[in-house]
Amino acid sequence: MSELITNAVGTGAAICSMTSFTPQLVKIWKERDASSVSLKMFSLTVTGFVLWTAYGLLLKSLPITISNIVCLALSAAILFSKWKFRNGDPATADGAGPGSPTRPA
């Protein structure tokens, strides 16, 4: 029974961690804007997941390794999006973005 509870807690934690990045990534992709995302925070987060993945590999723990690889990929995608959309969508850099006076909303 104790192992079942331990695995359930670990699985729940992994699912929460893995899905926590999805809303931010979707928001950035839809809005084509990552100017409000903290570069320092996500750089540190990516570094943390690299270390967690290495820890999982050293322990030969597949659950730790896989969940942290997924988290690493999602947080790295946000970090990449921060670079790509750092000033908003390049297509709207001329000021003709949604809601601007030169473009109907």
Image: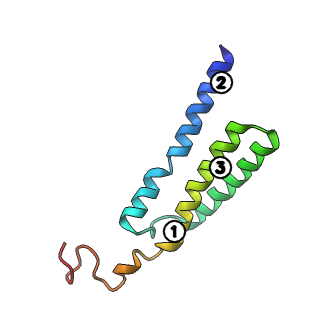
The location of residue 91, given as percent across then percent down, is 37, 80
CA gap, disc 2 to disc 1? 36 Å
From the image, state whether disc 2 or disc 3 is nearer to you. 3
Residue at the spot of label 2: 6
Q: Position of residue 23 (x, y in %)?
A: 43, 52
Q: Which residue is mark 3?
A: 69
**Is 82 above or below relative to 60?**
below
60 up-or-down from 88: above or below? above
State the SS at label 1: helix
Vertical position of residue 60 compared to residue 70: above or below: above
The residue drawn where x is 36% and y is 66% is 31
Tell me residue 59's x, y (percent): 80, 39
Helix, strand or loop at label 3? It is helix
Q: Residues within 10 Å of mark 1 (few under 14, many from 20)?
A: many
Q: CA distance from mark 2 to mark 3?
A: 21 Å
**Could you say where residue 73 lies in the image, as x and y percent from the top left?**
60, 55
